[in-house]
Image (cartoon, grey):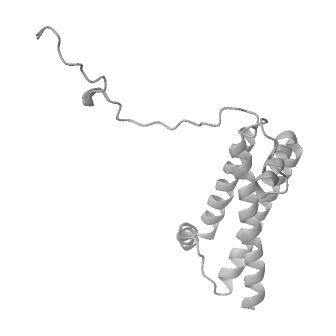
Amino acid sequence: MDDSLEPAQDERRCEERRTSRSYVFRDKRTGFDRRAAPDYATARGFVHHLLIALRDSSRTLMVVLLTVNVLNLVDFALTLNALAIGATEANPVMASLFEASPVWAGIFKMAAVALASLLVWEWRRYRKALLAAMTMLAVFTAVFVYHIVGLALFR
């Protein structure tokens, strides 16, 4: 047996491994997958069609983002109204801010949604950003309906 041959060394040594992790934004394509035409009768196809319409029309995306910000303002006003008649804030972060001062709660709420809207606008060529815009619109619409139904039942 030849002693000059040493056993193969493992290429991945523990001391040489990377320990830090970094986030990689994987949606690097600016376009959408055009290999397969989506079926518009399904929910996924409908969302795909909607996101393409948002991507292609800056004006429509601007209207969506402005609507989100207006619904956020309306949500804040309706929350103040509900708190005045005895309701409690369900969001623990906003509840603590309302305890400190309604002004700080309003500043935080408006700034957070405005920042999210600006980020969506800057990254509007990415599918995930457009999906975030539609999610914000759906959430604030649902919160608005919740407020209207809650106020109707509470009075």
**44 sits to left or right of 87:** right
Whole-percent x and y of residue 47? 78, 53
Front-most of residues 58 and 37: 37
**4 sits to left or right of 148:** left
> Image quadrant for the N terminus?
top left
Whole-percent x and y of residue 82? 69, 81
Which residue appears farthest toward the front when viewing the image? 1
Front-most of residues 144 and 40: 40
Q: Residue at x 24, y 20 (%)?
A: 9
Q: Residue at x 60, y 63 (%)?
A: 104
Q: Residue at x 63, y 84 (%)?
A: 87
> Image quadrant for the C terminus?
bottom right
Front-most of residues 147 and 138: 138
Looking at the image, residue 79 lies above or below residue 119: below
Looking at the image, residue 112 lies above or below residue 90: above
**84 sits to left or right of 38:** left
